[in-house]
Amino acid sequence: MGWNDAVGAMERCANGVLLVLPFFLWGTNMVVMEEVMPKTGAMFVAVARLIPAGALIVVFASLGGKKFPSGARAWSSIALFGLINGALFQVCLVEGLSRTTAGIGSVIIDSQPLTVAVLAAVLYGELLGPKSIIALAFGILGIFLIEVPVAELQSLLHPASATNTPPLNSNEKWSIWDSGEWWMLLAAQSMAIGTIMMRWVSKFSDSLMVIGWHMVLGGVPVLALSIWKQDPGVTGHLKDLDLVDWACLFYVSVFGSAIAFGLFFYSATRGSLTELSSLTLLTPVFATIFGYLLRNETFTGLKLVGAFITLVSICFVKVEKPKEIEGQELNKTKYEALPVDTIP
């Protein structure tokens, strides 16, 4: 092998690492968030993922010559985008993570392409083929198996036996709002709406600036919520954090948000969009592996089946986009390349 061949092989290897790295960062980020949330408060971690990371992205975009948003329409669209894809998504995400595992949470978050496909078909006239419709149905089944507790499934399948079996604690009644999987599903829907909104928001501002500013603006109401809930992170308990805790906060903000987003955007604008899109399924894989290694988290048999069905169904969901969308230009970046699911 000559020198040029060796250099070419190293470049291909480096490009492969850069392609996979965002999904590694997002998957491990979920596990790290679980670790630090009990000490800082869930909402404080959400703030750490939004405001500092968004500010870093804005600075990076400015250094790259990107123009700041200008005009009421640009800022109002970014603010609305920040409320849904920033604040609402992060609140549901951390509420879900405080009640379920990183692996299960990542699978549910990655189910958002199912919702995107439906919304894109309804709002933008994108087409769903028979294979995609079947995949959507199986995706819903998979999410159902993940979401619903085993006891509830048993009561649905065998109502007579469930009636004759007394509850373990008659004073406690299961609520869907106690389910981390339900919160994760809401987070996925917020992200799906954000994905659809990105096409509209990017008409008025540079895509990179949109991502950065929507994180900063979306972090403001989450910060207010953190103060209202008196999270330890905002009530003077930061001094109780050790070096590992600070490292976790730094990781979720800088690596799990800003750097992961930057790498994803870099790959999306210069590589294969189909290949990049398929790699999103690596996020729950990494989350599951590191959740098991670092926190001894495992799937139950039923949830494992549901996760498998959901991930497979996502692979078969495909929309056909109209050839032209009049009056819409996405800052020379294809809609599919826009890194909207960059904050899982």
Image (cartoon, rainbow, N blue to C red):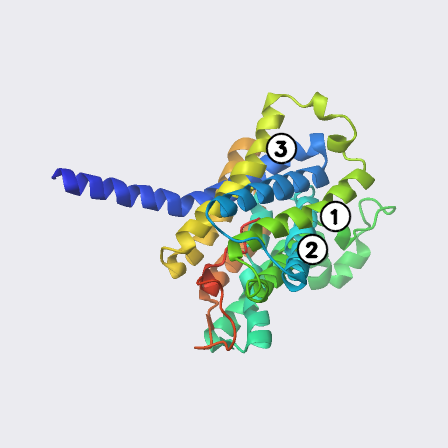
Residue at the image point whose x is 52% and y is 44% from the top: 26
Q: Are marks 2 and 1 in contact (CB under 8 Å)?
A: yes
* Residue receiving disc 3: 35
Secondary structure beneath label 3: helix
Foreground residue among 239 and 179: 239
Q: Which residue shows up at 53% across the image and 53% down it?
A: 67
Circle 1 SS class: helix
Mark 3 and mark 2: span between their CA atoms?
26 Å
Please, is residue 113 above or below residue 37 in the view? below
Q: Dividing the image into 4 quarters, which one contains the N terminus?
A: top left
Residue 234 appearing in the image? yes
Residue extending farthest left: 2
The residue carrying pointer 3 sits among few (fewer than 14), some (14 to 19) or many (20 or more) residues within 10 Å by Cα, namely: some
Q: Is residue 297 visible?
A: no
Q: Is residue 2 above or below residue 119?
A: above
Q: Could you say which quadrant of the image residue 48 lies in?
A: top right
Q: CA distance from mark 2 to mark 1?
A: 8 Å
* CA neighbours of label 1 inside 10 A, class few (<14), some (14 to 19), many (20+): some
Q: Amino acid at mark 2?
A: Leu
Q: Position of residue 234 (x, y in %)?
A: 76, 32
Cα distance in 3D space between marks 1 and 3: 24 Å
The reply, left or right, for residue 124 in relation to residue 172 is left
Q: Residue at x 69, y 52 (%)?
A: 183
Taking depth in this image into account, of 63 and 175 the one nearest to the observer is 63
Q: Amino acid at mark 1?
A: Pro
Dot 2 lies on which element? helix
Tag 2 residue: 83
Q: Position of residue 324 (x, y in %)?
A: 45, 77
Q: Earlier in the sequence, mark 3 or mark 2?
A: 3
